[in-house]
Image (cartoon, rainbow, N blue to C red):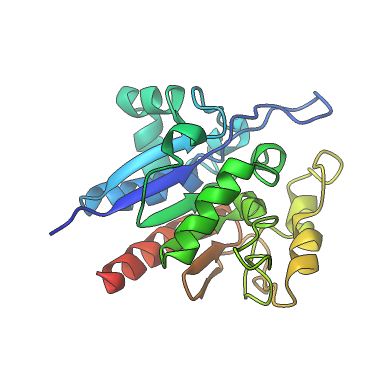
Amino acid sequence: MRILRILIVVTNINIYESGKLRTGLWLGELTHIYHEAITNGYEVTIASPNGGNVPVDPESLKRFTLDKISRRYWEDSSFRKLLKNSKSLAKVSGQQFDCVYLAGGHGTMYDFPNNTTLQNIIRTHYETGKIVSAICHGVGGLLNVKLSNGEYLIRDRTITGFNWFEESLAKRKKEVPFSLEAELKKRTSNYKKALIPMTSKVIVDGNIITGQNPFSSKEMAKVIIDELKNKR
C-alpha cells in the first residue's frame, strides 16, 4: 500500500511588528498532527516560507499550554533539529502530498496570507482532490487563495479560525496585524466558532478542514487522519 504524505507548513516569523513580544509557531498545532501521522506510518515534510529555523512561540511552551505530546517532542533533540532545518516552500512546491496542513501561531499572520508559493501549493492540491487543512491563525493562509476559475478558495465554504474574542483573551488585540475572524467573514458567509471560546472546534467542508484554536489540535489531527483513511 502506498505511503501517505503530509506537508506541514509553519512560520518563520519570531516577533510581532511592534517588536515588543516574541511569537512563532504554536507548538501543539504541529506536534499533534505530526504524532498522529508518524504513528500511522505516514511520511511527514515540515516546510516554511523561507526554510530553515522555525521559531516557537514561548507562550506555547508554558506549563498550562505544553501538553504531554508536545512536551515529549519538545524534549526530543531529533525533533528540535527538524524545526531548525525546515524545507523551504519553494523546494517542495513541485511535490505532491495527500494533505497540506497549515499550522498556526501568530507568526503566520505575517508570512502566510500573501505568500504566492503557498497559495499555488494549496490551489494545486485542492483542485486535485487532496485535503487542505489549517488550524488557528494558520487559517489565514487560506484567505487569499484563488482557484483556477478566479474564485476565492473559501468563498461560501464553512470554516473556522481563531476569533476576535479569543484574541482578546490572549491579550494580543493590539499586536496582531488584522482580525482573522473579520477577514474570514469577508471571504465567506459561513464562518463558525465554538459557543465557548478556547474550546475545540473542527469543521470539515469537503476536502477543506479547519480548526479554531490550539485546543482543537488533538481533535484536528484525528479528523485529518480519519479523512485520509476514508480516501484510501
Identify the residue at the far front of this view: 149
**In this view, 55 is above or below 158:** above
**In this view, 48 is above or below 225:** above
Question: Hey, which quadrant is residue 129 in on the image?
Answer: bottom left
Nearer to the camera, 199 or 23: 23
Using residue 191 as the reference point, say whether residue 117 is left or right of it.
left
Question: Hey, which quadrant is residue 164 in on the image?
Answer: bottom right
**In this view, 12 is above or below 196:** above
Identify the residue at the far left of this view: 1
Q: Position of residue 4 (x, y in %)?
A: 26, 54
Q: Quadrant of the C terminus?
A: bottom left
In the rendered image, is residue 68 in sight?
Answer: no
Q: In which quarter of the image is the N terminus?
A: bottom left
In the rendered image, is residue 100 in sight?
Answer: yes
Nearer to the camera, 201 or 204: 204
Q: Residue at x 56, y 41 (%)?
A: 26
**In this view, 182 is above or below 119:** below
Using residue 2 as the reference point, say whether residue 189 is left or right of it.
right
Question: Hey, which quadrant is residue 110 in on the image?
Answer: top right
Q: Residue at x 50, y 36 (%)?
A: 89
Q: Residue at x 66, y 32 (%)?
A: 23
Q: Position of residue 225 (x, y in %)?
A: 33, 62
Q: Position of residue 189 (x, y in %)?
A: 75, 77
